[in-house]
Image (cartoon, grey):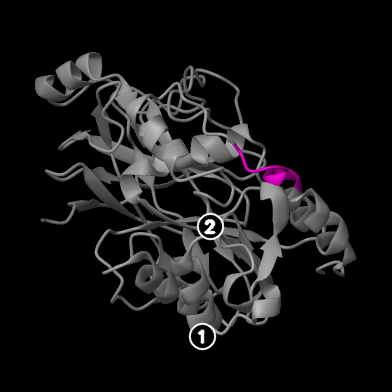
Amino acid sequence: MKRLLFLLAVAACGTDAPPLTHDTTLDCPSPDGLPFRVTSGFRHAQNANLAKMDTRIKHEAADTIGNPSGAVANTHLADTGMPSTTVEIDGTMGVTTTTGGLFSMPMTDEYVSAWTYDGSAWQQLGRGLTDQDGLFSLPGALVPNGQPIFTVLEANGTCARAYDETLPMGAKVVVTDIDGTLTTSDNELAMEIADPTHDPAMMGHADAMLQAWAMKGYPIVYLTNRPHPLRVETRGWLAEKMMPTGPVITSNGTASDAAAYKTVWLERMVMTFGWNIVAAYGNASTDITAYQNAGIPKTQTFIVGPLAGSGGTQPIDNMDFQAHITSYVDQQPQNN
């Protein structure tokens, strides 16, 4: 798979013209107009035709986590890869049919640019062309935690959203699985893949539980075995359910099992970045194994669903986090 042809960041076209909107954020994947100027129109007719026929947008962009001015890793890093000090903005531009959620057709050889709003103006972070697989990798720069980065397919103004989360060594964080932990079962995802109008059912008070942690100042890291092509659905669902903003780590699909892949990322957080995982949530045996592999105490490992309390973990009873919020989360100190 060939890598993207890198291009230096350049100013957007038509910078002397007024913006199309005055928005300070974009409603990805289909914003109604852009607040900055980019090239318009597809470079290739086949891509224009694809966009008309396959209307489900599958763009995705990797999040980046790590230490400020230190080692970082984005969610496309290979399972065998090592974090480094190089910041890149990686992702894929593609589309699919209404029912083809896991698969997509790539937008090849089209311009992509990365943008962020810094509180006073829009800034372009990088620009380049997608490769034959719709992949792009742009020279990047870290932005403040919680400040979104938007990767835009310039041909039609569609986009994907990404975030950076850089924290010093010793930082306290909360890690959670998604399927069967924040949703009621793995089957909810399968139904959404087949039908994009399906709204996956949420585990009882899962949103309130994570919001309670966030209100106390604890960053939330979402660690899911969902593959990269499902990032757009994942980001959309988390936002719709008012889950706290945080990095979403998705799978390359190359690990032998979910426990191995999750262990890799947990060890990066704990050993490379020096983060302190104060609470870890899951539902599956692979979650229990991965959290144990990373040295997370069983007293801080919370399991919901049929395996609640297995292996010495702390049970979340009745498929609902409400009692846990009162008995545990509310009792934790503020994270300053």
Whole-percent x, y for residue 127 in the image: 32, 45
| Residue 110 to residue 311: above or below | above
- The answer to whether residue 80 is left or right of residue 225 is left
User: Which residues are the magenta region?
Assistant: 202-208
Q: Does the magenta-highlighted stretch encompass residue 143? A: no
Q: Quadrant of the C terminus?
A: bottom right
Disc ID at residue 103: none
Residue 268 vertical placement versus 306 (above, below): below
Q: CA distance from mark 1 to mark 2?
A: 20 Å
Quarter holding the N terminus is: bottom left
Residue neighbourhood size for the residue with mark 1, other residues' Cα within 10 Å, grouped as few (<14), some (14–19), many (≥20): few
Task: Tell which of 21 and 29 is nearer to you.
Answer: 29
Residue beneath disc 1:
271
Whether residue 79 is visible: yes
Q: Is residue 206 magenta?
A: yes
* Residue type, mark 1 in image: Met
Query: Could you tell me which residue is drawn at 64 percent across and 35 percent down?
Result: 241
**Secondary-structure class at tag 2:** loop
Q: Position of residue 114 (x, y in %)?
A: 41, 43
Label 2 CA crowd tier, 10 Å (few <14, some 14–19, many 20+): many
Q: Which residue is mark 2?
A: 177
Q: Nearer the viewer, residue 307 or 81?
A: 307
